[in-house]
Image (spheres, grey):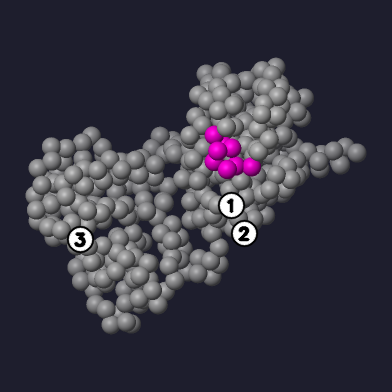
Amino acid sequence: FKLKREFSLSTAESFFRHIKGILVNHGARRVEIAGSARRKKEIVSNLNIVCEVENPDKFKRSLKKDTGIIKFVSRGDHVEFFYGDCEIPIKLLVVPKDYFGSALLFSTGPKNFSNYLISKGKDYGYKTFPPGYLWIKGEEKEIFNILGMQYIPPEVRERWKEYLDTKELLSNLNIKGDLHVHTNYSDGISTIYDVVSFARDMGYKYIGISDHTKDLKVVNGLNEKRLMNERLEVRKLQSKFPEIKILFGAEVNIRQDGSLDIEESALRELDFVIASIHYGFYLDRETNTKRMIKAIRNPYVSIIGHPTGRKIGERERMNMRYDLIFKEAEKTGTIIEVNATNDRLDIDSNMAYNLRNRDILFSIGSDAHFAPQLHSLSNFGVFILRRALVSENKVINTFNLNHLLEVLSRKRRNLNKDNG
């Protein structure tokens, strides 16, 4: 079951929901995702599933007869197969009720964490059994307690030692808003009203409108005049939503020479500016680095959107000197986005982890083009920073409105001081 392709976490989770229904139809009583997908890794290559059944042999015989099953292989408690035209290999562990928690714990991994649990188990007199797991009765959290450990969330088990030292993780409960949202003014589906209404119902305190600008004609990007017309609509709409502050910005394009596609006179009228690269991904390393640094130095640029430009399964990250880029962001106070779109997840948790102790702030952006996509911020973006052990005080989505506005305007205030 070798696989060369990589899949986004969203794709894996979506396929899991489909497979779960099939497994239940064949007699499974409980089905949970495991492996790297349960650890919320941004890119996965297979789908690990733990399945509780009453009669394993009967269940496997029934499953094998399913017309959607391809390349069914059964080895003891393990079953591997493909399903339908999906290219994600499925690795299924079939267990009785009493050992479901243990199976879920060890199937989640990673291996170095599982090995540590095994060493702890041996200290308590437990032995390993095929496939090298501690078979301890109880739910997963109970097993942590049995082994004398505090519960460690799946998404931080790759960095569990550092998590135990900090015990501080970003929480969805403290997210107050989202700044990267598109509407039908450019290539979004929802109206500004629908976006704001949806955000208000989510409990957000603020929402940022940031449509594409004029260089992206293929997505109906806004020129300066249309941008100011949208600004006027946002200001008028605010009176209908006293519970939530509507911030007006734009996602402007970073051209190949590092300039932006909107005039400075219009940028001055925005509450914030997200600057992103949308074309020219394959320029040489030096050129891409210079264009990004030039954009970061622009005093009106608040946030760099999807900084590496990668698209999972489609495009690798751009060839740039990221050390120099993040050094410049730190120097200028430019915020780095964690783009939560399911095929971007950019920056990833490894890059965020390496930046967590730098003087750099992060903004999680849903990059929603349809109001319900606002949920991607909490479904994916928050987990990227949890995996990276980034503290809440580094994430501007947790800031109250006054603090947020102060941070977003910091660069242009410094410009005014210099000019004064």
What is the crowding at mark 2: few (fewer than 14 residues within 10 Å), some, or many (at least 20)? few
Give the extent of the magenta segment: 198-205
Numbered mark located on residue 174 in the image: 1
Q: Earlier in the sequence, mark 1 or mark 2?
A: 1
Q: Nearer the viewer, residue 419 or 59?
A: 59
Dot 1: element: helix
Depth check, front residue: 122 or 148:
148
Residue 362 visible from this viewpoint: no
* Residue 44, percent from left and from top: 36, 47
Q: CA distance from mark 1 to mark 2?
A: 21 Å
Q: Which one is earlier in the sequence, the residue at label 3 or at label 1?
A: 3
Residue occupying image coordinates x 75% and y 37%: 299
- Judge from the rendering whether residue 383 lies leftward or rightward of residue 52; answer left or right: right
Q: Quadrant of the C terminus?
A: top right
The residue lying at 51 percent from left, 55 percent from top is 386
In the figure, 99 relative to 313: above or below? Answer: below
Picture residue at 60% right of the left edge, 55% below the top = 392
- Residue where numbered disc 2 is placed: 357
Number of numbered discs visible in the structure rendering = 3
Residue 220 appears anywhere in the view: yes
206 sits left or right of 22 in the view: right
Question: Residue 405 or 277: which is nearer the viewer?
Answer: 405
Q: Secondary structure at mark 3?
A: strand
- Counting residues from the N terminus, which is met first, the one under dot 3 or under dot 2? 3
Residue 261 left/right relative to 312: right
Kindly identify the residue that appears in the image at 66 percent across and 38 percent down.
Answer: 243
Q: Which residue is mark 3?
A: 95
The residues bearing labels 3 and 1 have C-alpha atoms spaced at a distance of 37 Å
Position of residue 8 measured from the top left corner of the image (x, y, whole percent)? 39, 42
Magenta run includes residue 354: no
* Amino acid type, residue under disc 2 in the picture: Asn
